Amino acid sequence: MLASTPPLFDDALDAPIREELAPGAGVLRGFALGDAEDLLAAIRRVAARSPFRNVITPGGRTMSVAMTNCGAAGWFSDRRGYRYTAIDPETGRPWPPIPALFMRLARGAAHEAGFRDYAPDVCLINRYEVGARLALHQDRDERDRRAPIVSVSLGLPATFLFGGFLRRDPQRRVPLAHGDVVVWGGPSRMRYHGVLPVRDGVHATTGVLRYNLTFRVAR
Ligand code: MD6
Ligand code: FE
């Protein structure tokens, strides 16, 4: 676990440098860079089967972030609440399987951060247009709240808000760029976090969009 291992100071210049955010949480800068184009192609294939949609919160607000999922279950929300479903409510069919590349990347990143044998069963895919944001929240709908979340940023940069265990705790602002991976588990798993509104810009690969993959052990 990140919490119990000393920091690794890699000699190799091309090795990702781990930036610890808190015990159990860290950023692997550029970890997904080499796979970025293939990841985006895989996202398009998933979205061809389970399209991006802007779900409604239980409070009745439409989320600015568009979402889809792959895996044995997917995260969904409507007026009845937040939950994981085995069937995509929009298509009536199971969510597409997690692409092999996604699994390799998620396992590799978790391993790099000290979490062995990571076996996510859900990958939530978020798509941010300019101005889209994710309000401060805890990821608390998963059964296993110790297993890490692996979070992959693609496209336009964003500012990740990284807080404490209470909503009112102060937050750090963590810039996340194309290819950065955040691993988030152990004692930090229940920290509040969010994403500031994505700023205007154009990314060479994704244009005016930011994508984020978050892998979870949900069921
Ligand atoms: C995002 N990420 O970066 C949204 N949750 O687009 C999350 O909500 C998140 O990045 C838990 C752990 C890492 C994350
Ligand atoms: Fe989250």
Image: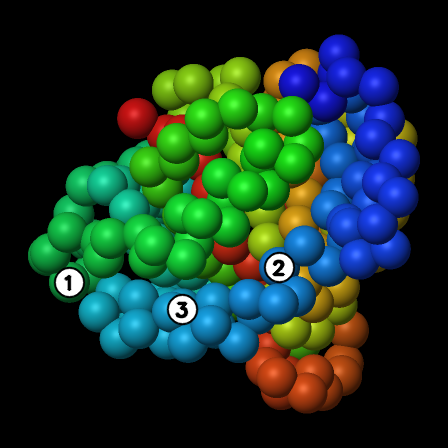
Residue 122 appears in the figure: yes
Vertical order, 133 against 25 (above or below): below
Q: Which of the colour schemes (rainbow, by chain, secondary structure, one colour) is used?
A: rainbow
**Percent position (x, y) of residue 111?**
58, 33
Whether disc 1's CB lies below 8 Å from ligand 1 is answered: no
Query: Residue 32 has which mark?
Result: 2
Q: Mark 1: which secondary structure?
A: loop
Q: In which quarter of the image is residue 119?
A: top left
Vertical order, 205 against 77 (above or below): below
Mark 2 vs mark 1, CA separation in Å: 30 Å
Query: Answer yes or no: do the residues labelled 3 and 2 have beta carbons within 8 Å?
Result: no
Q: Mark 3: which secondary structure?
A: helix
Location of mark 3 (residue): 43
- Name the residue rendered at 65%, 25% in the picture: 114
Vertical order, 142 against 133 (above or below): above
Residue 167 appears in the figure: no
Q: Quadrant of the C terminus?
A: top left
| Residue 136 shown left or right of residue 161 in the figure | left
Mark 3 vs mark 2, CA separation in Å: 14 Å
Query: Going from the N terminus, do you reach mark 3 or mark 1 first?
Result: 3
**Percent position (x, y) of residue 124?**
43, 50
Mark 3 vs mark 1, CA separation in Å: 17 Å
Disc 1 marks a residue whose amino acid type is Thr
Q: Nearer the viewer, residue 166 or 19?
A: 19
Badge 3: how crowded within 10 Å, few (<14), some, or many (20+)?
many
Badge 1: how crowded within 10 Å, few (<14), some, or many (20+)?
few
Query: Residue 91 has which mark?
Result: 1
- Name the residue rendered at 15%, 51% in the picture: 94
Query: Going from the N terminus, do you reach mark 2 or mark 1 first?
Result: 2
Q: Quadrant of the N terminus?
A: top right
- Name the residue rendered at 58%, 25% in the picture: 115
Query: Going from the N terminus, do you reach mark 3 or mark 2 first?
Result: 2
